[in-house]
Image (spheres, helix red, strand yellow):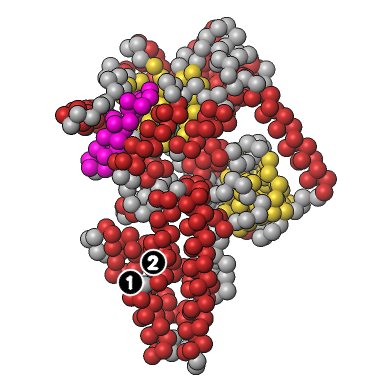
Amino acid sequence: MKQINGIAASSGIAIAKAYQLVEPDLTFEKKKIDNPNDEIDRLEAALAKSKDELEKIREHAKKEIGDEHAEIFSAHLLVLSDPELIKPIKDKIMTENEMAEAALKETADMFIDMFKNMDNEYMRERAADIHDVTKRVMAHLLGATFPDPALIDEEVIVIAKDLTPSDTAQLNREFVKGFATDIGGRTSHSAIMARSLEIPAVVGTKESTKIIEQNDVIIVDGMNGIVLVNPTDNEINSYKEKQAAYEEQKDEWAKLKDEASVTSDGSHVELAANIGTPEDVEGVLNNGGEGVGLYRTEFLYMGKNQLPTEDEQYDAYKSVLEKMGDKPVVVRTLDIGGDKELSYLDLPKEMNPFLGFRAIRFCLENEPIFRTQLRALLRASVHGNLKIMFPMIATLEEFRQAKAILLDEKDNLLNEDVDVSDDIEVGIMVEIPSTAVTAKQFAKEVDFFSIGTNDLIQYTMAADRMNEQVSYLYQPYHPAILNLVNNVIEAAHSEGKWTGMCGEMAGDSIAIPILLGLGLDEFSMSATSILPARTQLRQLSKADMASYKDTLLSMGTADEVVAFVKEKTEQ
Ligand code: PEP
Ligand code: MG
């Protein structure tokens, strides 16, 4: 047995065989061939296998994520049957005695270069399609397997260097029992999604892909950030017991599903959930969520090859609002950038994507995209209790500009005789230190704040949230963070506004007592954290926690804060 340590990203224990989601080496040694007809046969066989796989993946995607998301695979299938691509490959084999691999690569590269540089967005997307598809054909020519999460049909633990949010969205909950990645942190989006999918996960293990072989037996302990490779029978049995104990604990928490989130001294706070898709609402309600504190709408824009239309967005927002009834739903406008890419927008690679052209910065520069989303939201507003918030606000001007566009679209809709709700609160995420520091000025203009600690911590501590090398500096309990959070809450309250928190810190058992004492009004977290948080809150006294506020805010280090909270709350 070998133990690999990483960062605990999603609770639970999984035991299954490893499935290496690592792209095979697609390099080859170029040589001339003697028998072109054999080469054509090899090419045809590789094309046929690729088509077969893509059809399976498309069917799977239709079932799991809907017809529109499956479109991308139809586009890939079209590429494979396109004579304009296939004929030149065959010609190269027949007339230049090229091996199939070289003919495929040279032809594909030629088309990719040509399309990539065109002005037309549709043609640029074709470059990406050809790239993806020819990789699969190449793998078959080289006798390598091209891993595909959608093709997994037995219980496995996925091992990958990294999982993008769209890879994570494709994981099939029935078969993927857990995952371990080399890179990433607790607040990288794949970790956040693992929690909403309730898949145990360990990230930032640095070397899982090197140490673990395909089909090794793996245990992922998502509570302690441990991955065990080829454990002994005794170890497996002991982890099976832990798994059973965790399930029992979940049953215990479930008893509080319909209970109020009240502290032992009678204060109510709102426990809401963060979601990425309308399908996540079921988990929110099953876990007793009192609202949606953050709907990350960018997932609507991902895993496809074009922007979602106004109607597609309207349907998604309406569905969430209707399912939540009169419970509040805070929808965040598009927060693309950082670790969330939209390949079809073809934005230039940046040196520091988390500090770059993202979120509201992108939306204010791309007004038509922003306006489409706002119209969809405004139209959906009559179907529930909608609140809108803008991500990554750094200056008051940005907020004013975004709000003015929202009001302009509202006027447009009213002029078109479309109903729009009259009382939509408009707030901002506080995830940039400049905004946290000047919260007083913002509080006069916004309806609410939602503190995004995932980013606020990385910007305050100058420690990339994705980089496990500096994860020791990513300190939610650092007094600098607590003071910023306190500043935001006080500023809001002085103007009669409310403050929520939708960063992962809101569901953390050490942070919860502190945030309660600071007066946070709404805690929004992964749905699976709600019941443990409610259990904890019911045992805490808000008055006691508030009395520790000055002591906590004046402490020197995160460790002191943790020790103090543990002592006071007997954790
Ligand atoms: C945050 O930054 O805390 C947040 C909730 O947004 P995201 O994790 O999507 O960046
Ligand atoms: Mg953020």
The mark found on residue 58 in the picture is none
Q: Is residue 371 inside the magenta stretch? A: yes
Q: Quadrant of residue 91?
A: bottom left
Looking at the image, residue 410 sits to the left or right of residue 101; the answer is left
Residue indicated by mark 1:
111
Q: Is residue 527 above or below residue 492?
A: below
Looking at the image, residue 87 sits to the left or right of residue 245; the answer is left
Looking at the image, residue 474 sits to the left or right of residue 246; the answer is left
User: Nearest the camera: 13 or 183?
Assistant: 13
Determine the residue positioned at 22% across, 42% down: 368
Residue indicated by mark 2:
78
Q: Quadrant of residue 107?
A: bottom left
Return the x and y of residue 165 as percentages of the image width and height: 47, 46
Return the x and y of residue 15 as percentages of the image width and height: 71, 47
Tell us which disc is closer to us: 1 or 2: 2
Instruction: Indicate the amino acid at tag 2.
Output: Leu
Q: CA distance from mark 1 to mark 2?
A: 15 Å
| Quadrant of the drawing holding the C terminus | top right
